[in-house]
Each structure stands twice: as C-alpha cells, then as structure tokens.
Amino acid sequence: MKINDVILQTVTKIVTFIILTFAIYLFFAGHHNPGGGFIGGLVISSALILMLLAFDIETVTQTLPINYKVITGLGVLVSLFTGMASFVFHVPFLSQAHLHFYMPIVNEEINIATTIIFEIGVAMAVVGTTMTVIVSISRNKGDEE
Amino acid sequence: MNNIVILPIVIPFLTGALLVLFPKYVMIQRLLSVLSFLAVMGTAVHLLQQVGGEGIQILNLGGWEAPFGIVLVADTFSLLLVITSCIVALGCLIYSFQSIEWERERFYYYAFIQFLITGVNGSFLTGDIFNLFVFFEVMLLASYVLLSLGGLKKQLRAGIMYVLINIVSSMLFIVAVAYLYAVTGTLNMAHLSVRVAEAGQPDLLTAIALLFLVIFAVKSALLFFYWLPESYSAPPTAISALFAGLLTKVGVYAIFRMFTLIFYHEPGITHSVIAWMAGLTMILGSIGAVAYGNIQKVLAYNIVIAIGFIVIGIAVFQEAALTGAIYYLIHDMVVKTLLFLLGGAMVGLVGTYQLKEMSGMIRNHPYLGWMFFIASFALVGVPPLSGFFGKLLVLQGTLETQFYVLGVIGLLSSLAVLYSTMKIFMNGFWGENQLSKEDEKTSTHGLLLPCTLLICVSLFLGIGVEWVNPYVAAAASDLMNPAVYIEAVLGPA
C-alpha cells in the first residue's frame, strides 16, 4: 500500500529551513546563553532526520552525498587543532582569544572568540555521530560495506 | 604551566580521529598507530626527566587556575604508568598485525585502540575527579567497541554483561562524585585533599570513601571480579591481552590515588577494608586459577590474584610496601600482557582452549615454550626476574606493619600462580607431540616479535632494578606525602 505523505513532504521542505536557522541561532547563542556546538549540532541532525523520515534514505543520500563518519573525524580534528594552537602561542592548552571589531551595517560591536572554531568542530562531530547511528540502524544488515 | 603534559592524551586522540578518515588503508593505519605510541612514550620519558629535575608538572587547561578549572598533573607515579601502558599497547598492536582478521582491521580497529589509550593516559594524568570519570568513560566506550567488534555470539554475550556491570558502576561513580561535591564543594583532587584534611575525615566522608572503594573495586576486579574471566576470554587475543594489561590497572591506579591523596585519615576503617578485600581476592583468585583447565580462564584468574597482591601495598600503607606495589604493578602490566599473548599463540596453534587437548608443543615451537616458561617465572617472582623485587618489598612491608596474615596469603597465592602457569606449561609443551606442522591452525609467524619485545622489558625490569627503582621509590614517596602534590597544584600554602 502506498502511504499518502504529500503533506509531510511539503511541510518538511519548509520546516527543514526553519530548523536549520534555529540551529544557527542556537550555535551562536552558545557563548553566553544556553546553546553552543553540541546543541546546535543536535538540532542540525534533527533537520536531517526529519528529511530521512519524510523521504527515503536513497533520496536523502543522493541530495546530500556525505560520509558522516568522515564528518565525525574531521570535527574532532578541528576541535583538537584549535586546542593545539596553544602550543604555537605558548599559552595553556584550550586557551581562548577574543576578537573585537565593528560591523558597519548592523552598527554593532561584534565579539568573536576562538572558541567558535572549537564549537564548529563539536557540531560536526555531533552531526556525524548522530547521523551515523541513525543511518546504520535504518539500513538492513549487509546493505553496505 | 607545561603544555607537554597534555601530549600523552592528545597524540593518541589525534591519531584516532585521523584513522577514522581512511579505514581502508590498513598499512598507513598500522604505521600511524605505531608512530603515535612511540611519540607518547617519548614525551612521557621527557616529562619524567622534567619531573625529576623540576618537581611535579601541571597544566591548567584553558588558563583556568586550580581549583576552579580542570588541571592535569604529571607526577612520577602517573608517568611511569603512562610509559608502561604505551609499551603494553605497542606489544599488542604489533601482535595484532598478524593475528587480527582484515574485516576487523578495516572496521576502525586501530582507531579504537588509540581512543582506548587516550582514556587510559587521561585517567592517569588528570587531577580532577570529575575529569577522571570522563576519561574512565572514554576508555570504557572504546573497550565496549573493541570487545564486541566482530559480533561473534560469545563476544556479544560477554559484551552485554561487561557493559551492564560498567554502566552500573559508572552510575555509582557519578553519584559518589556528587556526594563528594555536596560535602566538600570541590572536585579538584588536591583541593579535596585539603578540604578533607581540614574536616578531619568525619564518618560521612569515610562512607563516601567506601563507596568510591566499591566502584574502583568493580572496575579493577578487586573482590568483585566475577565479570572478568568471561569478558576477557571473548575477544581476539590481542584485544584481551590489551585489556588484561591496562583496564583493571587503571582502577588500581584510582584506588592508589584516592586512598593516598584524599582519604588517608581513617586507615583503621578504609585501609582495613582494603586489606580484607585484598586477602579474599587472592584466595578466591587462587582457587579459580588452580581449578580451571581452560587456558584463558586460568590466565584471567591470574589477573585477579595479581590485583589482590598489588592492593596489599595500599592496605598496609607503608612506604616500602607501596614502592613494591608500584613496582609489581608495572611488572604485572607487562608480564600479564605477555602471558596472554603467548597463551593466545598456543590456542591459535591447537585451535582449542582446553589444556587436556594440547601437548608436546616444545618440539616444533621451542621459542614459544621457553618464553612462556620465563614469563611464568617472572610472574611468580623468581629472582632475578621482574616480579621478585616488587614481591620482596611488599612482603617486607606486611611483616614490618604486622599484617602477617596478608603476607602469608600473598606467599601462598604465589604458589597457586606457579602451579597454574606450570599446569599450562606442562600440558602444552611436555609430552608426546600430537600436532604435526601441517595440522596447525595458524602459524606463529610475526607473533613472537612483540612477545620478545615485552620479555626484554620484563628482563630489564628484573635485572635493571638499580636503574628503575629510584623512579619507583620517588613515586611512592610522593604518594606518601600528599603535601608535595597539593603544593604543585595549588601553589605554596
């Protein structure tokens, strides 16, 4: 029997973008408020999982041909290398530095910490791990590899 | 501040993350894994020299000062264990080049070995009790994967039990950390030591100390060892040898650290409980080692006996005994791994774990036989091999502090160790050779090299006591004087 999933698929196409925007908001909120790389990463993966539910796994892998295991590894590497930059600057491991600059259009002082690169790594690792788990348990045994 | 302290944790972590990127290129994976362990060993030896010259090295992560931030502390005791665990891991790694099937090799096997070492080294180096929990979990998660990698029925059966035991004890661990934080208001080990000393360790803190003792006893197979023989005999030899050498020893390290640095004010309660546990562990372990006829079970019960023996050092709580216990701990990590690897090679040749079904292997495999013989004698503590010096000091400590019963049990357990390993040797290598070269299931090609490496380390520990002992004695004297550790972390009082 063919399931009628037109509504789910149409809604998903819009909602995915809302979720991704929210994820980016949460990601940047993280420095002083609740949020950050871990939660941002989880919300990004929830958008991807919604796509997996509404469409099927083949469609999603065709649209996003990503090897999530590699994303996990890369994320960990990004985070580690941010920490190891401390070896170059002779400060304790995982120290952070701040960058202040003035944004002309929004007319505001922007404050960026190097923690943001670390958090990008965390988000990548979280997305990679979550999606690897979801994709592997949604496959049948012996489908791939 | 010394950033090198983080390197023994970062190098294997980095290597592991790199290896995840290209699981199919097995040769590069092998090469990078070996290089990683050599690099860690190099940095640890360098740190050990620094500690000898300048005192305990610390690193405040992210520049947050202790006791508020997380601090890594490299003292002689932890560095000796980091170096030993790298030697052990290197031996198992080289052994697995020839013995692990390519399906496992291509499925992130080497990456998870690196993550396991990340957790082990992290546990040795951290100076924060919550961070200790985190690194325990890193190590355990990697061990869950390595234990069940391959998905054989017996691996999954052992895996479920192993995971359950560890989840329950980890949950208790986090509860105990919460109790401790609620009572003392700090998680930094040096700061904890100061706070507990100020309070004089009242009954409430002693109760928390006993809770910690139970947790680490489960992790290190002290008295609560029922999970160990089953789960260590399920995975392939290289992995079970790695577990035998490292995992339980991290629990022992935690007991040493907690009961010398933090909870040392009520030895009448905590340390006598440890003494009882050590005695019972040795007795029960000896019964198991003597009773079984399955080579892996016998070796697994030998781990249990050794844990009981090492913990005597902390039970009698005296410097000579502690020196001996640390020496024996280092020796046991090397030799137990060696015995597991040699036992695995024997099992590989015959294709069975049952001692009754092997005999006469000395004809075709003299090196294997003699190495097993030397390793067993080192384990028992026949001079001048590596077990002797540690055992001597521990027994001396028990006599000086009038723990006669523990000393006698320790000596008798040595007899049980001797009996059980000789049982393997006589059954496996003496007698009629029933196995022609053609009937052997696998060859020992490439397996004897890592065993030779480990046996050289063991011989060095035995003959080179003069060189190694100053470091071990320094480690023990630091453990007996918590003020040194506290001053290094929190600054002069």
Image (cartoon, coloured by chain):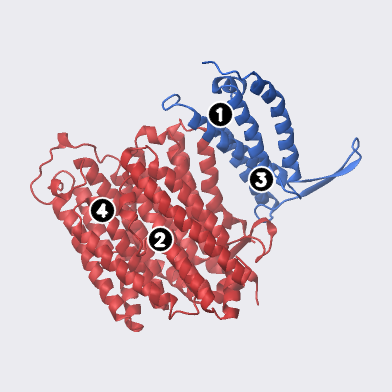
Chain colours: A blue, B red
Give the distance between the C-alpha atoms of the residues marked 2 and 3, in whole angstroms. 37 Å
Residue B234 placement (x, y as % from top left)? 32, 45
Kindly identify which residue carries mark 4.
Answer: B297
- Residue B314 located left or right of residue B456: right
Give the distance between the C-alpha atoms of the residues marked 3 and 4, in whole angstroms. 46 Å
- Report the residue at 51% width, 70% height from top: B208
Kindly identify which residue carries mark 1.
Answer: A67
Kindly identify which residue carries mark 2.
Answer: B218
- Report the residue at 31% width, 74% height from top: B392
Give the distance between the C-alpha atoms of the residues marked 1 and 3, in whole angstroms. 23 Å
Question: Going from the N terminus, do you reach mark 1 or mark 3 first?
Answer: 1
Whether marks 2 and 3 lie on the same chain: no
Query: Label 3 is found on which chain of the structure?
Result: A
The residue mark sitting in front, 1 or 3, is 1
Residue B128 placement (x, y as % from top left)? 58, 62
Observer able to see residue B456: no
Mark 2: few, some, or many residues within 10 Å (few <14, many ≥20)? many
Residue A82: which numbered mark, if any? 3
Judging from the image, what secondary structure is the residue with disc 1 in?
Answer: loop
Quarter placement of the N terminus of chain B: bottom right
Give the distance between the C-alpha atoms of the residues marked 1 and 2, in whole angstroms. 39 Å
Q: Amino acid at mark 2?
A: Val
Give the distance between the C-alpha atoms of the residues marked 4 and 2, in whole angstroms. 18 Å
